Image (tube, coloured by chain):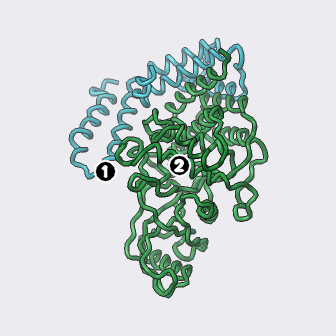
Chain colours: A green, B cyan
């Protein structure tokens, strides 16, 4: 696997872009590695393209496989197809331009997209009010974008690689969580209890739609106070719309701003309002807390898996190690959150 | 073993040195890793100081919940065995109904004990 900063990889990238853009040549002007991305490596690349209808300078992002992959994540070719479907539907995803499934160019598959500008840092977005023109407007717009994504429903030929859950999505998740816990060395009684609760209290199934499955603060860019792009499509899949809504609103993704229940940046009401306006359907607010519990269990399971990547010795990392220590806080949330759901359901 | 200053003390002073003497001199892109190191040292320090008492209390809570004491293995092994049993029982809903209150109290107790080590600030917010 080549490092993208190596000369051979740079030449490979230039050759690929020239070919993909039907250009006489393409030259890299500047490039730098972008942060984030546990399962992918992202580079900001400025390029000049010559002799093509795309002639001129372009601000691009090259997204390639990282050293390690998570079993759950899509391949680069699949992610390209999902991002393209979302973009064509009018969702604010960066425009994906070209896919290179051939490892001959830079030693691994990658794709190229237009670069959106802005800040993704979730802690700063949740804490520094001056970064947003209006948290309420942003929450509303994020609701709207999500509803637009959810207008894509199966079957879709270009997305035929996405598995269609063959039964209630919740019960499929329950099975996946248990299978994941079974691969870990230590027992997890609190999570087992919460997963059992999800199983026993599973709501009626809802129609399947295209879900982002990591739609949260930290995975979109804000530029000059406004939404600029929705990123990180590698976990997308057919699911129930409420899985994305619950993930976005779950306490664990509010980055300390717990009172702003939509992603730590705005109110739930604003987020739902945007969703409802775009979809023409009302959000059943009573359904969301259940899916927030699903979100919290899912994040706890992922956190345990991250810690295991460190513990196994394959990928020693302080960040991964500390992620494992987030789990008690998620369990504490779960105990409280499930009790709250039960209290609300109890007749007075 | 007599070794003063002990592990918890060493971690505390090492962390203070990192935060007070080193952190102000570090470039901005090194701040986040430095803060992660400080956090890891704080967690390790608390765990070292509390481990023995915390394990004994957890074992006692398990013995009370299951109404029996395990005899084989050291306390660490017995705790692992009890946790395995609890995880299996929770998965199949063994205590649903009449045992649910006790089960939740035990889980709550466990989580609080772990938070005391990993993130005591979270406990302070929700006493």
Q: Which of marks 2 and 1 is in front?
A: 2
Nearer-the-camera pick, A177 or A246: A246
Q: Is B119 left or right of A160, judged from the image as shown?
A: left
Identify the residue shown where x is 46% and y is 65%.
A115
Question: Is residue B91 among what the camera can see?
Answer: yes
Nearer-the-camera pick, A269 or B12: A269
Residue position marked by numbered label 1 in the rendering: B30
Q: Measure the alpha-carbon separation of dots 2 and 1.
A: 32 Å
Determine the image quadrant of residue B117. Answer: top left
Marks 2 & 1 on one chain: no
Residue A280 against residue B6 in the figure, above or below: below
Q: Where is residue B59 in the image (x, y as percent from the top left)?
A: 54, 18
Q: Residue furthest right?
A: A166
Residue position marked by numbered label 2 in the rendering: A142
In which quadrant is the C terminus of chain A drawn?
top right
Q: Which chain carries label 1?
A: B
Q: Is A27 left or right of A94, judged from the image as shown?
A: left
Residue A319 against residue A297 in the figure, above or below: below
Residue A318 against residue A337 in the figure, above or below: below
């Amino acid at each position: 696997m080549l490092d993208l900063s190596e000369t051979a990889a740079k030449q490979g990238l230039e050759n690929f872009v020239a070919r993909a853009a039907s250009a006489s040549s393409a030259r890299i002007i500047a490039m730098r590695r972008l942060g984030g991305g546990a399962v992918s490596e992202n580079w900001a690349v400025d390029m000049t393209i010559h002799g093509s209808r795309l002639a001129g300078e372009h601000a691009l992002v090259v997204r390639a496989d990282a050293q390690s992959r998570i079993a759950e994540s899509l391949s680069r070719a699949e992610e390209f197809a999902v991002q393209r479907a979302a973009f064509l539907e009018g969702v604010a995803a960066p425009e994906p331009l070209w896919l290179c499934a051939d490892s001959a160019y830079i030693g691994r598959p990658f794709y190229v997209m237009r670069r959106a500008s802005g800040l993704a840092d979730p802690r700063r977005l949740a804490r520094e009010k001056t970064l947003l023109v209006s948290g309420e407007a942003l929450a509303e717009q994020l609701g709207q974008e999500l509803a637009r994504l959810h207008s894509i429903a199966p079957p879709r030929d270009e997305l035929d690689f996405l598995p269609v859950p063959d039964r209630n999505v919740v019960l499929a998740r329950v099975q996946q969580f248990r299978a994941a816990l079974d691969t870990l060395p230590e027992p997890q009684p609190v999570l087992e209890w919460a997963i059992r609760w999800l199983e026993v209290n599973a709501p009626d199934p809802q129609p399947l739609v295209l879900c982002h499955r990591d739609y949260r603060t930290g995975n979109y860019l804000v530029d000059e106070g406004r939404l600029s792009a929705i990123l990180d499509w590698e976990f997308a899949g057919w699911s129930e719309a409420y899985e994305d809504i619950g993930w976005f609103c779950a306490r664990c993704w509010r980055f300390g701003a717990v009172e702003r229940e939509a992603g730590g940046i705005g109110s739930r009401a604003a987020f739902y309002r945007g969703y409802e306006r775009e979809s023409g359907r009302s959000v059943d607010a009573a359904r969301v807390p259940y899916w927030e519990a699903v979100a919290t269990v899912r994040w706890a399971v992922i956190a345990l898996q991250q810690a295991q990547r460190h513990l196994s010795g394959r990928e020693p990392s302080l960040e991964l190690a500390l992620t494992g220590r987030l789990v008690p806080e998620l369990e504490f949330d779960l105990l409280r959150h499930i009790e709250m759901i039960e209290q609300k359901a109890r007749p007075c | 073993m007599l070794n003063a200053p002990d592990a918890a003390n060493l971690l505390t002073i090492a962390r203070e040195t990192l935060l007070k003497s080193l952190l102000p001199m570090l470039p901005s892109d090194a701040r986040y890793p430095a803060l992660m190191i400080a956090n890891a040292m704080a967690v390790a320090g608390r765990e070292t100081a509390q481990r023995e008492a915390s394990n004994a209390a957890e074992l006692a809570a398990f013995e009370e919940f299951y109404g029996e004491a395990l005899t084989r293995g050291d306390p660490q092994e017995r705790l692992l065995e009890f946790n395995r049993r609890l995880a299996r029982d929770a998965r199949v809903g063994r205590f649903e109904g009449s045992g649910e209150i006790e089960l939740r109290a035990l889980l709550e107790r466990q989580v609080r004990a772990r938070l005391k080590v990993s993130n005591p600030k979270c406990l302070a917010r929700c006493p």
